[in-house]
Amino acid sequence: MTDATDLMRMLLVDPDQPFPPVEFADPSGLVALGGDLSPERLLGAYSAGIFPWYNPGETIHWYCPDPRSILVPTGLRVSKSCRRSVAKADYGVTMDRAFAEVMANCAGPRAQEAGTWIGSDMLEAYLRLHDLGHAHSVEVWRDGELVGGLYGVACGRSFAGESMFSRARDTSKVALYWLCAQLAAWDFALIDCQVASGHLTSLGAIDLPRADYLDLHTRAAARPGRPGPWQFDIAVPGSPDHLPA
């Protein structure tokens, strides 16, 4: 349990106050409370392996859990059904074509889930990061309609995956498949999946001790990245029949 002393240490009162060392995190990985979602604060957090995660209306919670779930781009585990969906190519796939739409879909209601952690302040904050060239999306289209996608934040050659959605079978997996293929071609070291789940594990995500994750992430984040709008430079499905007009 976090006591009053630890809580005071975690509070970010001054906008310029740095994050506490992640070693001060509580057992859930909570590092700090408060602060804001300015681009400077968010980029500083992601560079340090810290991310915001809280419900709309709550004080901002900042986490760096131990262990940490990551996916190596070349380590994606593709099921037979997903492989068929990828090979079928009855879709078009793009990058940074509809970031706001992807986030809105990720924030929408989902089966067997109550509410969303992506509130209006999150939407505005990550749209600013996108406009600055740090947050990116992958979109899957079918007959001009957005049917799947994902978004996240890049730091150097490390990519923090935030959320994904599907409006048709396997379309979020198709988005992840092509993201992994492109990040592998760009020599990205990892996709940060943050917290483990059965779904992520089935896709090939692994858990690392926090110290090992931070070592890998810090080295990858220090390498030159690809700021600005992203687009695929590998061959991807892109039939005009499936892309939006």
Image: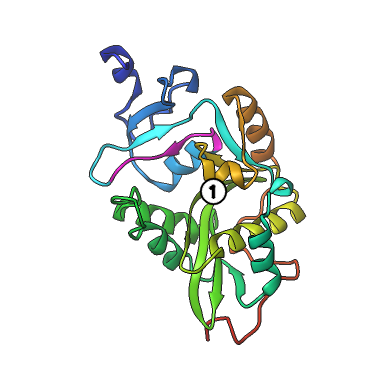
Q: Residue furthest left?
A: 57
| Residue 72 horizontal side relative to residue 244, left or right | right
Neighbour tally class for label 1: few under 14, some 14-19, many 20 plus, Cα within 10 Å: many
Q: Is residue 199 visible?
A: yes
Magenta stretch: dominant SS? loop
Residue at (53% x, 66% y) in the render: 169
Residue at (46% x, 68% y) in the render: 167
Residue at (68% x, 39% y) in the render: 220
Is residue 102 depicted above or below 20 in this figure?
Answer: below
Colour setting = rainbow
Is residue 51 covered in magenta? yes
Q: Amino acid at mark 1?
A: Gly
Is residue 154 depicted above or below 181 in this figure?
Answer: above
Residue on which disc 1 sits = 161
The residue closer to the viewer here, 190 or 207, is: 207
Quadrant location, the N terminus: top left
| Residue 61 horizontal side relative to residue 193, left or right | left
Residue at (69% x, 34% y) in the render: 219
In x, y percent, where is residue 158?
Answer: 63, 44
Magenta region: 47-55
In x, y percent, where is residue 90?
Answer: 63, 78
The residue closer to the viewer here, 134 or 149, is: 149
| Residue 17 horizontal side relative to residue 206, left or right | left
Is residue 124 covered in magenta? no
In x, y percent, where is residue 128?
Answer: 43, 57
Secondary structure under the numbered disc 1 in the rendered image? strand
Which picture quadrant has residue 205? top right
Q: How many numbered discs?
A: 1
Which picture quadrant has residue 174? bottom right
In x, y percent, where is residue 159?
Answer: 60, 47
